Image (cartoon, helix red, strand yellow):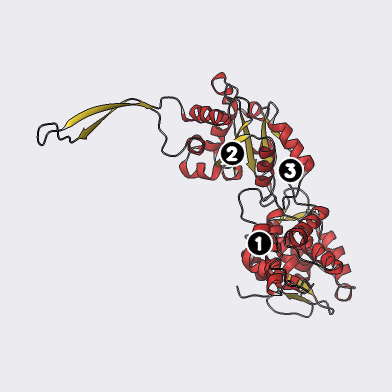
Amino acid sequence: MRNLTAFKKFKINEVFTPRRADVNTSIYIARPNLEKELARSIQGSLHTLIYGNSGTGKSWLYKKVLADLNATYIVANCANATRMGTLTDEIYRSVVPCGTQNLESMEEEISANASMVVANGGLKSKRKYNITTEDPLLTAFQQLRKSGGASAECVLVLDNLETIVNNDVLMDELANIVILCDDSRYSKFRINLLIVGVPSCILDYFSKVKNLPTVANRIQEISEVSSFVGSQVNAFVETGFIHLLGVSIPNTVLEVWKGHIYNVTLGIPQRLHEYCECLAYKLEDNKWTPTVEALKDADLNWLSLGLREAYSTVDGLMNERETEIGRRNQVLYTLGKIQVHYFTARQISDRMKKEFPISTTGVKLGINTILSALASKPNSIIKRCSKGASFEFTDPRYLMTLRAMLNKTKDEKIVKLGFRL
């Protein structure tokens, strides 16, 4: 196979960009329904809320849609508001250029030496400026509309909403900003709010706000920004490796890659970029010869770079000694195989019997006890659901880690992919 270094259209870190802030248009995977729903909401009469788990591509989605609409927008970070104690100041600082001041009725005395005056004398002059008397939110709206022009869509993005959800003061401030947008002094600037965060349900956001109905009636919550489905992951892999990096991959290898990448990343866009970046560098080290075996090295690098903490947590939950059966290890392995968001002890038990037919036949497994013990540990990988007897993962990173970390031998023992913690 030829060395493709000279034929590549892009560098690896130009194709797979897990930490890139702007939209990577070369490998952006379209979500037509979400994009249409978001565009219509932005152009509508209500403000918009986007939600989805971390890494699912919320930022790329809204930036792509706003670019398509040729909208003018700025991003205010709610995390910064927690640091400063006010959301309004973060909005103002995001919109108004640093160092810009509007001063009114302030006099500054300037002393300037001049050869034409008496020795050691001074020439005093006065300059008048404007001092800001309007509130900073109104000034920010005015500046944003000025930047956008008369007809453009102007959007104020409030990102990382999850950082202020438990802050009553900032949530009250956000509620008031939403309501003020209908006040004639503010509404004349036609600024749309786009609120972006991890949790779902607008009622949860404003559950402690006194004027909850008033706020909720002004915000439209669009469909959840979720992980890619299998076909989107396949398109991502083909676009990145074949079309952009120019790698010739045998179909048998490509199909294994697609299935494995979807399985371990759960289709989460950020994790896809991370994993494929690791795989691409392994491919480069292997003189651009694609093999199924390269996946194991990619798993190891990916775990060590981005999931080290999750790996350590799972490692701490495994049987300390290698017993004949290692039941807890089998449970952990089985948890990595489930395809549902919520699961019961019965579901795990049934799946375990299929995964480990030899060691589970005629044996009382006690799965509910094992799951309950796992869920009771602080900062564990699973937790009990608020209602019913179901469990769920506390973070999708743990499911990804289980899938990449644990393997099953022919004699039904569980082995872990190891690296130095």
- The mark found on residue 353 in the picture is none
Q: Is residue 191 left or right of residue 68?
A: left
Q: Quadrant of residue 412?
A: bottom right
- The mark found on residue 158 in the picture is 2
Viewer-nearest of discs 1 and 2: 1
Across and down, in percent, residue 401 comes to 70, 65
Disc 3: which residue? 224
Q: Quadrant of the C terminus?
A: bottom right
Q: Image height check: is 244 above or below 291?
A: above
Label 1 to label 3: alpha-carbon separation: 32 Å
Give the mark nearest the N terminus, 3 or 2.
2
Q: Please tell me how crowded label 2 is: few (under 14), some (14-19), or many (20+) other residues with Cα within 10 Å.
A: many
Q: Please tell me how crowded label 1 is: few (under 14), some (14-19), or many (20+) other residues with Cα within 10 Å.
A: few
- Front residue of 321 and 254: 254
Q: Amino acid at mark 3?
A: Glu
Give the mark nearest the N terminus, 1 or 2.
1
